[in-house]
Structure formats: C-alpha cells, structure tokens
Amino acid sequence: MQDILTKIVIAVVAAIGLLHSCEPHSNLVVQDASFWVVLEAEEAKETGNELFWEFQLNRPGIYNIQILRDGEQVAPLPKVSLSSAGVSMEEEPPNIFVIQEAGEQKTVSQFNKTIQYDTAGLHNLVLKVDVPIDKVRITPLYSKNLGFGTDTYYGEWLQMHQSPEKQAALEWFKDAKYGMFIHWGLYSQAGGIWKGERMEDSKNPGPNVSEWLMHKFQIPRKEYAEMAKTFDPDNTFAKNIAKLAKDAGMKYVVITTKHHDGFALFDSKCSEYDMVDATPYKADAVKELYEACLAEGLAFGVYYSHGNDWYDGTDGNYANVKKRNDSLGILTHASGKNLWDPSPNTHAGYIENKALPQVQELLDLLPKLRLFWFDGDGFITEAQAFKFYKLVYENNPSILVNRRVGFDFGDYLDAGDNKIPAVSDQLTKYFETCGTTNNSWAYKSYDNDWKSTKELLYYLVDIASKGGNYLLNIGPDGKGNVPEQSQIRLRAIGEWLDVYGDAIYGTTRWKITKEGGDETLLGGTEHRAKKGFSRTFSSNDFWFTTKGNKVYVISLVNPDKSINIKSLNVDQGEVQDVRLLGNTVDLQWAQSNTGLTVDLTGISVNDNGYALEITLKK
C-alpha cells in the first residue's frame, strides 16, 4: 500500500505543478509518503469493533492520526478509542478535509492529540470504532521535523558529528554546564508595548514574549524598521554583560544575532537591515560582545533564526506548503509566519541570498565561535537544514550546532523553551534546557514575575543531575541594561557556584539522579507563567552528580542536624571520605545498609543549600 500511496502523492503533486524535483528552487516541504504509515481497514485483525495493526515506522517523530472514510457527505465520527506507543486517547475526531484519492472522494478526520514515536521500527495500533472506515493514516506533524530514517544525508552528517573536533567540543560543552542566553534587538526598546497596548491585550494569535512584538501586533515591515533609527545602546553594554555572566558562574554566552524580526546585530554585507547600517550606534554589537566575553574567559555562541525572517523571509513558505498539504489532507501550521506583510521575494531566495550568507559572515567574523544556535526551522527543507549544518562544519568543525537547525542534524538536543526532561526520558543525544529569569525572553517592561534564586538554582541542579546544560536567559532593555532583579539572582547563583561549583561543572549523571520529593518539571514558558512555582524543599531532598570516583550530593536547604542519604547505602559502593565543599571541617559520618549519615549540626552553609563530595573506594 505504501507504493500505491506514493504514486498517488506524486500524481497529485505533479498535477498541481509543485513536484519539488522539477522546481529545485521552490523550497517546498513535500510530504514524502515513505514517512507515512497507511493502515487499510481490510488488512486489520478484527475483534468485535476493535481493529489491530502491526506496522513499520521509518522515522521517529511526532505524528497525527487520521481516519479516512469513503465519500464527501460524511457525518462526524462518533467517539473513537485508539492506543499506540503507550498512548491511549478517546475522542470524536473532527472532519478536516475532503480529498481526492485515486479518483474517489475521501473524508479525512484527525485526532486532536498527537502521538510521539521515539524510535523507528515495529509498532502497533489498536482502534475501537463503531462505524465503517476505509483506512488509518499516521502522518508527520509538520510543525515538528522528523528524526533520521534512512536517507541520503545521514551518513555524511554522522561522519561530521563523530569527527574528533566535534567530539572534543561536546566534551567541553558537557563540562561547561551553565551558560547565558541573551535576547536583545529592536523589540527591546518597546518592552512588550506597542502604541500603548500590551501584548497580552492584542487579539492577534501568537506568543506574548516580547521578541515576538512584530508578529503579535502584525506590524508592517516598513513601520517596524523605523525602530532601528532610535536603537542606540550604551557603549558599555558588552563589557557589563560579559562581567555579569562571569560573576554568575556561567561558562558561555549565546546572543540573538538575528531573531525572527530579521534585524541583524552585526555588520552584514548582504543586508542593510543591521546594527551598523540602520542604527545611530554604527558599531558591530556582536563583535563587541564576542571580544568582551573572550576577555572574561567565556566561550561565545550565536543564535540565528534561519527559517523565519519576518522582514525578508516572505511568508516562511507557508502558502506553498499549505497548498500542497491541503490537497493531501494534511493540516499546515501558520505559527511564526508573516502572513500580514510578507516580503515580495521567495523563501528559497531568502535562504540563498540572506540566511546562508549571514551565517557565513558570522563564521568569518567570529573565529573562536563555539556554538551556533539555530531557531525557527519551520518549513525549510531537509536539504536546506543539512546545508546549514555542513556550512558551519566546513568553516569550523569545532562549532557545535543545536537541534533546531532542523531534521535532527544538531549535535545536541534542546529540551525546549523552559522545559526540563523527566528522569525517565530516553534522550538520543546530550541535552540543554534554555530558560528565562521571568516569563519573557526579551525585555518586557511590565513582567515582574521574577523566578527566585532558589527556583533558578533548582533548575540548574536538577538539569545537571540529569546530565544536561542550563542556558539561562537575560533580556536587556533598549540601552543594553540588564534588569536589576535579573542581575541580583544571577549573582546569587554565582556566589553559590563559587563554593559548590565542583558539584556542577565537569560532572555527569550518576546512576541515581535524586531522592526525596517528586520531580517538579518545567512544562514550557507559558506553563510556568500560568502555574507559578510553589515547590518547597526539605532536608531530605537530594540531587546527585558524579565525576570519577566522586559522587556529589546537593541540597537546596540549610541543614540544622544530621542527614541520612539513603541512595548512598553500602550497596552503592564503600564510602572512603565525605567533604563539605568550601569547608575544611572534619565531618562525622557513617555508612550502613540504610544509607550514609552525615552530621552537619551547627555547620554554616549557604542559605540556598550546600553540596557534599563523597569519595568512593575505587
């Protein structure tokens, strides 16, 4: 059936003149039927009103589940039960499309909930339905690119990813553990307000984080660009921010050299919409920060929005992709696309004439660059995503590329904006979580929901215990000044790391990550904004990291008595020595079958907790 469907797809695409092999510069995300799974009702194992299939999935990823029925005038589906990949759902899937398939009309209904398949290979699906159906389709969620299957790029990518330079860079990255993210641009002047209206009051769709100002208010390109005429930061911004990152105990810095609004903070030769040509500042802000960071001994990385550019990237290729997908019964997501005032060029032209050249400019400008943090992959093609990765590698194989370059070509994963993976998550690569100090990434003048030092430190410790990095964001205002509340918290974390940093830097995940209370996971930027943070910590909560034959035990409270660490009982290895980091006092301790008891009575530690270094006999 896969071969038949492939022929149908090709026929439909060719009929509407969009077959991408004939139009190499059309930049279409073509729904490749080899990524789909089609389950014919007549081929299912049937038990009563339950249908069972076993199927082969070519690529891991997030998928939609669709039910196809014969005819155009078809009533909405009654409640349907489905289970696959450990996920069960019960819905009345709405009708979304009527399509032509092999000359016959089919009604496509789609579940609202998606299913994530973490691995390729054999899976099964059980469907309970009370009306006749024709087939079930499992189709990729095209707001999320798929992982690798067997394709023409994987072998070449793997060779680059496994090169000695990349692997050495990954080891540095794993040791660094903690970095600063900076969202800064024209939008920083507005502080989340446009013509007296706050972003939350706009009726337009989209995130309320202030770097999305142009999108949220659907500001025309020419009008938005007027803000460049007043973008004139204090010329000490670079040294001030680099010093703050150093004081905070951070090891690397990543700045938004171009966000989705299309404005570049560096001197670009392929566009005049940049810091030098369009602002009164007349200097390369990226180069200044790069030099300031190197002077402080910090590694440097750049963020670059390659797929979305609201100024020069037309509609993000949305119209072309939607036309294609509509003909196949596939929903298309418009999030992050400029549909109110798209530029008159093509998206493929933007990629070739601006995005790729600007990436090259950054590589030339910053010879000691360590990280390239892509974002907004959107509707770029797999070939384009690979081209970005390869361009970086060929210029400097020691630069790490993040997941959002697209199609799993990154050297490491990001767990998502303000998201922390669970202990049980099976990650395929090393991970990093990026997070905010309040709820917006860029400066928002009225966002005073500052995360406490304890909350931010918890995220850093929890992420380190799971073997990942924390990239904590600041949002300077239009002058380049970092809000005082953000500075206070970062410096407090830096003071903690001055004493207990050995428990974070250079560590890896131990066989046990924590003991005590349940995980308090971040579910995303808006989740934290709505739900807040109410967790309290006790002297029985511990997180663990390891380095060599040492295990680090981290607590977020100030103890006033003896503690018992159950996870360090004799079954986990014989303890040779116990040391309180930052303190030379001889501790009284004893190990037994029930744990490691350490007497901390009367010992002064940081108000935000402490860390013990446990040496195990080799």
Image (cartoon, rainbow, N blue to C red):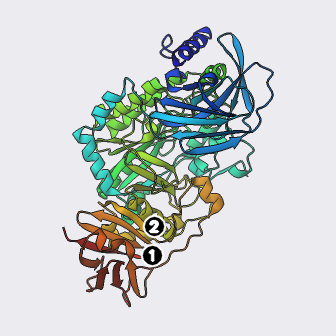
Label 2 CA crowd tier, 10 Å (few <14, some 14–19, many 20+): many
Q: Residue at x 49, y 70 (%)?
A: 453
Name the mark on residue 336: none
Residue annotated with mark 1: 608
Q: Amino acid at mark 2?
A: Leu
Q: Position of residue 430 (x, y in %)?
A: 37, 48
User: What is the three-letter code of the residue carrying label 1?
Assistant: Asn
Residue on which the image places disc 2: 457
The quarter of the displayed image where residue 151 is located = top left
Q: Residue furthest bottom?
A: 602
**Percent coordinates x, y for residue 175 in the rendering:** 30, 56
For numbered disc 2, what is the local secondary structure? helix
Residue 202: percent from the left, percent from the top?
73, 46
Q: Residue at x 65, y 43 (%)?
A: 89
| CB atoms of marks 2 and 1 within 8 Å | yes
Q: Nearer the viewer, residue 391 or 105?
A: 105
Viewer-side residue, 274 vs 340: 340
Q: Is residue 371 depicted above or below 271 in this figure? A: below
Q: Which residue is at the far front?
A: 47
Measured from the top left, where is residue 190 in percent x and y? 62, 50
